[in-house]
Amino acid sequence: MSAKKAGGYMKKILVYIIALISICFILPAIFTKTTKTITTTEQTETEIQEQPIQGSNTQYSKIKLLHQDTGEVEEVNLEEYLCNVVSAEMPADFELEALKAQATVARTYTIYKVQNKKHDNADICDKSSCCQAWISKEDRLAKWEESKREENWQKIETAVRETVDKIITYDNKPINAFFHSNSGGTTEIPINVWGGTNFPYLQVVETARRRWI
Ligand SMILES: [Zn+2]
C-alpha cells in the first residue's frame, strides 16, 4: 500500500469513527432534548388554556351535552359549559352579581338534570324549550360588537369562576332551579301555573321590578 493510499484509508476510518460517535452520543442527545422541549411547551399551553375555568372538583366536572340540531352528544367541562349557558341566557352587560346568580342557578339546574335524566344518552340538551339554552363561544362572540367581545367573555368567565362548585340545595339535594326573565313583581307557586307537583322551595315572593330590554 502506498503512503497516499494509506492516508486515504485512514481518512475513511476517521470519518466512520466520527459518524459512529454522532450516532451513539450526539444524535440521541439532540432528540432527547427536542422531545422534552415539545412536551414542556404542550403542557404549559394546555395549563394556560384551561386555567380560566378550572376549579371544579365535584364528581360532575364533565357532563354529556346533546346538540339537538345534529343529534351529537358532546362531553364537556361543566364550568366551560356554564359559560356558554350564562352567555346564552343573560346579556353580558348585566351586573356581575346578576350573572353570578345566573351561573349558580344554571349549575344547579344542570346537576339536577344529571341526577334526573330526561335524555337517554345525555345529561342535558342545548335547547331552552327542553332543558337549558346553550350557544357556542364562537357564535356568541360573533353576535357581540368586536370591541366588546373580550371584555364580555371575561365577565361571563368571572361570573362562573367566582361561583365555582356552588349550587342551591333543599334537603341536601339540588333544587329544580327554574328561572325567569321577569316575574312582574312577584313570583307564583308552580302548582298554580303548571298544576301537578309542587316544590316546597319555590314560594311566592316579591321581586324588584326592572324593565328588561
Ligand atoms: Zn333537553
Image: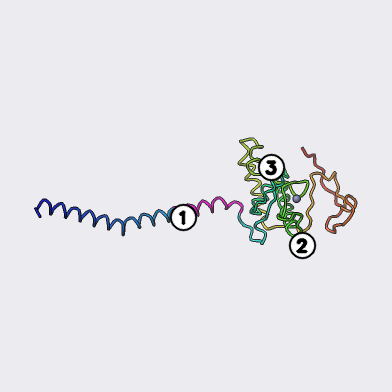
The amino acid pointed to by label 2 is Lys
- C-alpha gap between disc 1 and disc 2: 42 Å
Amino acid at pointer 1: Thr
Task: Check disc 1 and report the residue beneath it.
Answer: 40
Secondary structure state at the residue bearing disc 1: helix
Q: Position of residue 63 (x, y in %)?
A: 67, 55
Taking the spot 79% from the left edge, 51% from the top edge, the residue there is: 178
The circle drawn on residue 173 is 2
Please, which colouring scheme is shown?
rainbow
Q: Is mark 1 within 8 Å of ligand 1?
A: no
Of the residues under marks 3 and 2, which one precedes in the sequence?
A: 3
Coordinates of residue 158 in the picture (x, y in percent): 64, 49
In this rendered view, identify the residue nearer to me: 122 or 152.
122
Name the amino acid type tagged 3: Ala
Quadrant of the snapshot with the C terminus = top right
User: What is the magenta range?
Assistant: 38-53
Q: Quadrant of residue 20?
A: bottom left
Question: Against 183, is 146 above or below?
Answer: above
Mark 3 highlights which residue? 92
Magenta residues, dominant SS class: helix
| Residue at image coords 69%, 45% | 70
Residue 88 falls within the magenta-colored stretch = no
Q: Residue at x 73, y 56 (%)?
A: 120
Tell me where residue 146 sits by quadrant.
top right
